[in-house]
Amino acid sequence: MELLEICQNAKELTGKMGTLDTNTKNQALLQVADGLVKDAETILAANQEDVLRGKKNGMPEGLLDRLMLNQARIEQMAEGIRQVAALDDLIGEVLFEKKRPNGLMIGKKRVPLGVVGIIYEARPNVTADAFALCFKTGNVVILKGGSDAISSNIAIVSSIRKSLKICNLPEQVVSLIEDTSRETAAAFMKMNEYVDVLIPRGGAGLIRAVVNQATIPVIETGTGNCHVFVDESADFEMAIKIILNAKTQRIGVCNACESLVIHEKIVDAFMPQLVAALQEKNVEVRADEASYEATLSQKENGIKKELLTKASEADFGTEYLDYKLSVKTVASVDEAIAHINRYNTGHSETIVTNNYQNAEQFLNEVDAACVYVNASTRFTDGFEFGFGAEIGISTQKLHARGPMGLEALTSTKYVIRGNGQIRE
């Protein structure tokens, strides 16, 4: 189907979708979740095509991890949809209502955005998540995935549409643009006559291209140069556990730790222990001078020197999506915060500390969507936050910030009731 036709069909459905009752939406979502599980074999076969193609093309390990589906991940996708079905329906919610002296009743209620466009890379889970959240909020969604996951995306959208048909709902409430060319992507970004908002999900290059080229309003989901700051009062065992989780549980995700900041008073004692633990996971540490020397200070520490290098300035601002970690040594909480605010991408930052004052200062002064004390950055996720799923993690400050659930996919309108009033 031609791009223009897809967009026109989507726009025509917005009125119908905005008035669907809650029960109809929830039953359809449950049907879609069950359908994905039933169609798992077909989806996994399609995904295997994408994975094999990715390996052949030299796709990095972190991106392959994002691309790959298995039975457990399909079950998780389905569970996310079920959780969305269980959430309160925000559409039609009256936010306030008041009576003016002239008798007018002025109210404000929550409404869908309309047509939501998603441009994303090799993340087939986004296909299901985006549909569920948009459908629950009465929006129509147009998906533009990358060529790396095209077989997976076609299979998932086919399964969703089959379930919608069973529920006697129009299949076009979710559409996939199957042409993966840059020319079509560029044309899609300019469909502001039909598409109300555009959400990019992917690497820095994709997000920058959408922000720079789109004539449609964009909700920017940013890259994740996420930091862990180990304060001088930190419990070493807790800090190492948090860092290992944040860095190595899944390396190719935007909430993985890419940068470490350590207080200089503990660097000599902490770095050899940390690096030894990281090297068990084959993490390459790119350390500044102080942390580099501290790591090598113990002669018999068994450090693999090939996994320890000196950091360049560029390392501190790099989202690796790989088994790599930059390290910066600082003299104070103030210096740590200044370093993080300079190099972070506004995503997720954490402090490991036993000092209440330092924790509060970190929470108050670090400029990011999600700021943690004594916890892994990996929790920045719509599923973990209880949103059922997420449309993305916004690193901008207008409209939405952080994991975007149902509320981020709504707007509002004023509803005014009168009995013949005219303005004098």
Image (cartoon, rainbow, N blue to C red):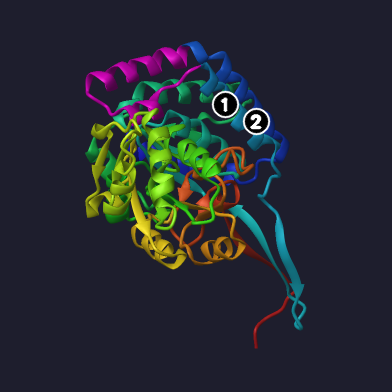
The residue nearer to you, when weighing 345 against 333, is 333
Q: Which mark is residue 82?
A: 2
The residue nearer to you, when weighing 127 against 165, is 127
Amino acid at dot 1? Gln
SS state under label 1:
helix
- Main SS type for the magenta part? helix
Check the picture and name the quadrant holding the C terminus.
bottom right
Q: Residue at x 62, y 28 (%)?
A: 79
Q: Is residue 31 visible?
A: yes
* Residue 369, percent from left and from top: 49, 56
Which callout, 2 or 1, points at the residue further toward the start of the chain? Answer: 1
The residue nearer to you, when weighing 235 against 144, is 235
Q: Which mark is residue 76?
A: 1
* Residue 156, percent from left and from top: 47, 23
* Residue 388, percent from left and from top: 61, 38
Q: Is residue 91 left or right of residue 253?
A: right
Residue 203 sits above or below residue 342 on the image: above
Q: Residues within 10 Å of mark 1 (few under 14, many from 20)?
A: some
SS state under label 2:
helix
Kindly indicate the quadrant of the structure image that contains residue 304: top left
Span shown in magenta: 42-70
Q: Residues within 10 Å of mark 2 (few under 14, many from 20)?
A: many
